[in-house]
Amino acid sequence: MTRRIEGEARQAVIRAQEQARRFGQHFIGCEHLLYGVAGADDAVGGILRARGVTPERVDEQLAVLVRRSRSAAPRRTDLDGDALDAIGVDLDAVRARVEQAFGPGSLDRAAAARSGRAKRDVTGHLRVTRQARACLKRSIRAASAQPDGRRDTAQLALILLDVKASAARSILTTLGVSAPELSAEISNAL
Amino acid sequence: MESTLEIAEGAASQDPDVGLRAVAALRELAERLEALQIENARRLGWSWQEIADRLGVTKQTVHRKHGPRIGRRS
């Protein structure tokens, strides 16, 4: 996918990937692409930053979103004894038998081994979410229709701003930035 | 304390919050037991195929999931 994108837009995708990795996420979404575009060394990146959409501020907002989603989801490394108890499974009894067979702390050691596996995955290839993939495809199409348009982040930025329900949009909203106004500004500048 | 437990048990089949959390916890517990059992089986010289048969999955599935962590038979 990145091979068909050139110049600053390609750099934006690379930055998006770096950000996702840094947050320990296994996917690239519109929010990461927004971060990538915000750091672009071109006119579009300049406009975004002038309106307060800087890489630092996108990072801060993503951190908030990530924290929120991780605290809402069950912590997978925790064994919820109360939840098991509700269906009649006595975690203490299971733990006692497992540790009798495999040694003290073995049930927790097994969890550590599993999270180690999950961490390794982040260094591999990152999945691009359906929405982000659609944005990239649309931007490639739009850019190739323009003379020399493939090299800057204008098309990608406009398409990202156009998606109404995305993490990128909620980050913009929290930053107090109107996506349609920002779009208009970018379109006018080109 | 006892009454809290009774309420939880009574609600188990009805309240999605309790039920879903129980499913997630069971899954986590099963994953941990699987990791421990496979590690042990490999230590005892079991092949991936033998392990896969007992788990009811393919050899590739179990190897892909646990191979990097456990490695070769010792």
Image (cartoon, coloured by chain):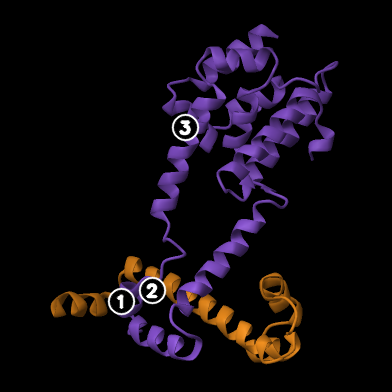
Chain colours: A purple, B orange
Q: What is the spatial separation of the Cα atoms under label 3 and label 1, in whole angstroms?
A: 39 Å
In contact (CB < 8 Å): disc 1 and disc 2: yes
Q: Residue at x 73, y 32 (%)?
A: A138
**Quadrant of the image occupied by residue B7:** bottom left
In-image side of A10 versus A67 (left or right)? right
Asked where in the image residue A93 lies, by quadrant, the reply is bottom left
Instruction: Give the number of the disc on residue A99.
Output: none
Q: Is residue A118 above or below residue B60?
A: above
> What is the crowding at mark 1: few (fewer than 14 residues within 10 Å), some, or many (at least 20)?
many
Q: Is there any visible trace of residue A165 in the rendered image?
A: no
When the figure is inspected, residue A124 is found, relative to residue A4, above or below; the finding is below
Label 3 Cα crowd, 10 Å radius (few <14 / some 14-19 / many 20+): few
Q: Which residue is mark 2?
A: B22
Letter of the chain that mark 1 sits on in the rendering: B
Left or right of A182 on screen, residue A170: left
Please give the residue where the numbered disc 1 appears in the rendered image: B12
For label 2, the SS is: helix
Question: Where residue A81 appears, x then y in whole percent?
Answer: 34, 74
Q: Are marks 3 and 1 on the same chain?
A: no
For residue A60, the mark is 3
Helix or strand or loop: what does disc 1 sit on? loop
Residue drawn where x is 84% and y is 34% of the image: A4
Q: Amino acid at mark 2?
A: Ala
Q: Does mark 2 fall on the same chain as mark 3?
A: no
Q: Residue at x 59, y 11 (%)?
A: A185
Which residue type carries mark 1?
A: Ala
Q: Position of residue A22 (x, y in %)?
A: 59, 42
Q: Nearer the viewer, mark 3 or mark 2?
A: 3
